[in-house]
Amino acid sequence: MVLFTLLTAFCCLSNLALGDSGSQPMRSLRLTSNRIFVSNRGFMLIKTAGIILLIVIAVTASTVSKRTNVSVDRVLPQASATPKTQTPKTAPAYYDNGVYDLIEFDGKRIAITDTEWQKVLDPTQFAILRQAATELAYSGSLTDNYEQGVYYCGACGLAVFRSKAKFESGTGWPSFYEPIYKKNVIEKEDRSLPGETRIEVLCARCRSHLGHVFDDGPPPTGLRYCMNSAALKFKKQ
């Protein structure tokens, strides 16, 4: 509608300009100089009208474009999918929360799936604690640890050994002659190696694999609890 009105006005101005340039018979009687003046005036009117028309068209186009952009911007957020909030993975409350149980096992077991353990244990811990793997000799961080403190299950934090029971066995694994409490560990027969029967040592609370026990230890028990460093956590006392 706006463009139609402007074009109509432009046509009127053009007709006026042409009329002024001498279309009527009486104008032919004027002097040549007057005709030139009128003709120039008509040309200027047409030129001015054309410039005004171009400016108005440019302003109109810009306004329409801005309105279109605003409309699109308002629609896009409504059409976009709402991002799903991801719940961060958190470890069970009993896992490595700074509180270690220096108590005799009370019989309350922790039973969670290996899938859940895999979320809170690193690959080495998981392989040893949950799949009964064995770390390489002399590769563990606790083999040569001689500080005073307590060793806890690396999975659930139950106390399993004291530093006073640790001794140098020369085997390349942390070795103890007795657990902190007999109830805190479970011993069961292990026939995973062909032609050899061993005694596996498990945490009594979460049933995680800690190592094996042998009967070649020092007094007063004559036992050697051969543990994996990755299966334990040490806290100074």
Image (spheres, grey):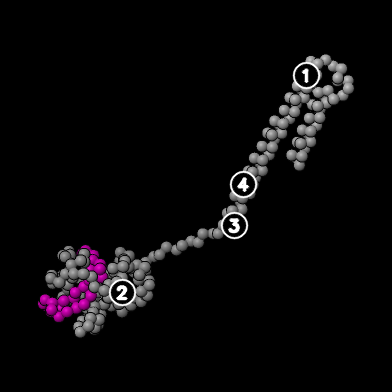
Please state the horizontal and vertical placement of residue 183, each as a whole percent of the image.
25, 79
The answer to the question of whether label 2 and label 4 lie on touching residues, with beta carbons closer than 8 A, is no
What is the magenta range?
211-237
Question: Which of the 4 image quadrants contains residue 218?
Answer: bottom left
User: Does residue 78 appear left or right of residue 178 in this picture?
Assistant: right
User: Does residue 73 appear left or right of residue 198 in this picture?
Assistant: right
| Residue 40 is at least partly visible in this image | yes
Q: Amino acid at mark 3?
A: Ala
Q: CA distance from mark 2 to mark 3?
A: 47 Å
Label located before the other in sequence (2 or 4)? 4
Label 2 environment density (alpha carbons within 10 Å; few <14, some 14–19, many ≥20):
many
Label 3 environment density (alpha carbons within 10 Å; few <14, some 14–19, many ≥20):
few
Q: Which of labels 2 and 3 is toward the front?
A: 3
What residue did someone put label 1 on? 36
Quarter of the image where the N terminus is located: top right
What residue did someone put label 4 on? 69
What residue did someone put label 2 on? 130
Label located before the other in sequence (2 or 3)? 3
Q: Amino acid at mark 1?
A: Ile
